Amino acid sequence: MVKEIKNNVVTPANDLDIRLTDAVCVNESQLEHAWYHNLKYLAVGVLFGIVFVKAEIISWYRIQEMFRLQSFHMYGVIGSAVVVGIISIWLIKRFNIKTMYGEQVVIHSKTFNKGQIFGGLLFGLGWAITGACPGPLFAQIGTGVGVIIVTLLSAIAGTWVYGYFRERLPH
Amino acid sequence: MLEFISQPWPWYIAGPLIGLTVPALLLLGNKSFGISSSLRHICAACLPANIPFFKYEWKKEVWNLFFVAGILVGGFVAMQWLSNSEPIQIHPSLVAELSTYGITEISGLLPEQLFTWNSLMTIRGFLMIVVGGFLIGFGTRYAGGCTSGHAIMGLSNLQWPSLLATCCFMIGGFLMANFILPLILSL
């Protein structure tokens, strides 16, 4: 299933393989760190959450406007984010920029399966009803819309149900 | 300065900042930007139930849970200390459309009449809050990523399956917003 794993420390033997099933974003590091090293991701998350709220990306109305072609805002946000992302990854690869721990940057590539179509359509339906993708759910709860906790729990349940029926679904 | 920050941010500020999350996470520790995976890690941590899909060392991905906890805190910070009191600007056609469903309280980021504990007991509220959430969780995992993992991280890394997934997100969204959601809202 996985053709190329550059970092060779995987315990148990197929742990990374399991994580790589139906996930774009999988991370594997040979380095072991104390838990508080994770606080830097908390900090990035805080900044990210602030952008989400201040640019109204977590607003139900902005998502409705996007899907009704009434506003350029969300297209501008996603489009410019992708452009900056493409340039950043190109620079990292071109100049072989290392992580702050001196590790080589590894990004796993994604192979096609039909889940990207079926799952993508289903997620699109959910995105337009709730006006939120998974990230904004967390930010909406933070802004004080308490009932979104139910949406988040339901999303976790949806993930679990997918895991349960995974073998029987077309991929 | 604070007054400047308190205004809604335009797309050309927010988009690049979100794009910079990609190299920030890569360089801070080889982490690929993605959010929906956190839902899977929560399943793996809380209720793996011997399902192979959830039998992995979720602690290796614990950074992702710190990241989403940060997003929640960021939402709180932005609301408490960086918000202004101006009502949100909404396209007049959307305002008109919503008023036909009796949705007129439109000052916050979400329509208060739709996303409250009380509306959870109505068919409309149940569909939007519970069924909508379920579709997000089921769909993103089936697709292998969400707007972050596919549309931003995947496209940044020029992955064509991510482009396909992103197109399907948009098609699903267009269908829901223009054809199905009007039926739900009129319930």
Image: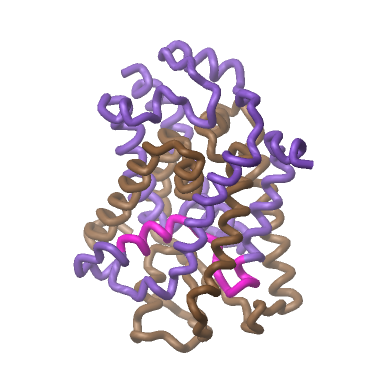
Chain colours: A brown, B purple
Residue lying furthest front: B81
The C terminus of chain A: image quadrant: bottom left
Q: Quadrant of residue A147?
A: top left
Residue B160, x across and y down, in percent: 55, 59
Q: Is residue A12 above or below residue B20?
A: below
Q: Is residue B18 above or below residue A131?
A: below
Q: Nearer the viewer, residue B77 or A87?
A: B77
Residue A32, x across and y down, in percent: 50, 84
Residue that appears at 75% across and 36% down: B3
The magenta span reads: B25-43
Q: Quadrant of residue B26?
A: bottom right
Residue that appears at 63% across and 46% down: A51
Instruction: Please indicate, yes or no, whether residue B32 appears anywhere in the rendered image.
Output: yes
User: Is A94 left or right of B125, judged from the image as shown?
Assistant: right
Q: Nearer the viewer, residue B83 or A56?
A: B83
Residue B40, x across and y down, in percent: 36, 61
Residue lying furthest left: B49
Main SS, magenta residues? helix
Q: Nearer the viewer, residue B61 or A167?
A: B61
User: Is B32 left or right of A104, judged from the image as shown?
Assistant: left
Q: Nearer the viewer, residue B4 or B92?
A: B4
Residue that appears at 54% across and 17% down: B95
Residue that appears at 41% across and 54% down: B143
Residue A12, x across and y down, in percent: 34, 85
The N terminus of chain A: image quadrant: bottom left
Q: Quadrant of residue B30?
A: bottom right
Residue lying furthest right: B1
B70 inside magenta stretch = no
Q: Is residue A100 above or below residue B31?
A: below
